[in-house]
Image (tube, rainbow, N blue to C red):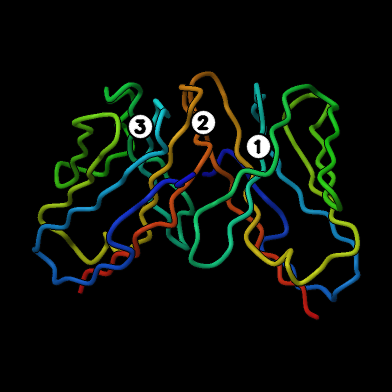
Amino acid sequence: TQLLEQSPQFLSIQEGENLTVYCNSSSVFSSLQWYRQEPGEGPVLLVTVVTGGEVKKLKRLTFQFGDARKDSSLHITAAQPGDTGLYLCAGQVGNQFYFGTGTSLTVIP
Amino acid sequence: DAGVIQSPRHEVTEMGQEVTLRCKPISGHNSLFWYRQTMMRGLELLIYFNNNVPIDDSGMPEDRFSAKMPNASFSTLKIQPSEPRDSAVYFCASSLTGGSQPQHFGDGTRLSIL
C-alpha cells in the first residue's frame, strides 16, 4: 500500500488544454514536494510546500497544499509538449520521506 | 556546476554476477541517497547517508545488497549475486540540507539482469 496515491495514473491531452493532477494521503505531511521526471533522466525538484493551504506558482504550473496537509494538487495551464513527463509528489512524515505513485502526462502537439 | 554523476548508465549482466553501481554526489552536499525505480513499485528508497554514515538502510532488499560511502565524494551500491528481479533503474541523489529529502538526482543506471 502506497502512502501517497496520485491520480490519474496516466493523462494524455492536447496542447493548450488545462489539467490538474492530484496527490492524496491519509497522513499529515510536514512538507510536500513535486518532481518532474523525463525519460532517461532522474526526477527534478519543482517545488516544496510546507504550510496548509499554501499556493505556489511556477510559470504555468500552480501547486496547492491542502489545508490539513494531507493532499496536494498540481494545475497546469495551457499545457505544452515540453510539459510531458512523469509527475511525482513526495512528502515527509517525521523523519521518513515517501514518493507517490506518479502521474504520467503526455501533451500532444 | 556538475550534478550528481552516476556510472555506468547502462549495465547488462547475467544472473549470479556481481554488479557495482557508482555515484559522485554534488560537491558540498552532505546527504546521499540510493533509490530503485520500477514500473510496479515506483521509486523506493534503498539507503541514505548523512556525512558518510548510513542513517536508514531499511529499504535494502536483502543481504545481497550493500552500500558504502568511503568519503564525501563517492558511494557504491553493490549487488552480489545479482538476480533477474533486481532489474530496475537505480538512482543516486544528494542533498545539501541533510535529513531524508533528496534534492538532486543523477540520471540513473539502467540495470538488466538476464
- To the question of a shared chain for discs 2 and 3, the answer is yes
Quarter-of-image position of residue A103: bottom right
Q: Residue at x 85, y 27 (%)?
A: A53
Question: For the C terminus of chain A, which image quadrant?
Answer: bottom right
Question: Secondary structure under badge 3?
Answer: strand
Q: Residue at x 14, y 72 (%)?
A: B14
Label 2 and label 3: CA atoms lie apart by 10 Å
Q: Residue furthest bottom?
A: A109
Q: Residue at x 67, y 50 (%)?
A: A6
Q: Chain of mark 3?
A: B
**Measured from the top left, where is residue B81 in percent x and y?**
10, 56
Q: Which kind of residue does numbered mark 1 sit on?
A: Gln
Would you say the residues marked 1 and 2 are in contact, meaning their CB atoms lie under 8 Å apart? yes
Q: Which kind of residue does numbered mark 3 sit on?
A: Tyr
Quarter-of-image position of residue B85: bottom left
Residue where numbered disc 2 is placed? B101
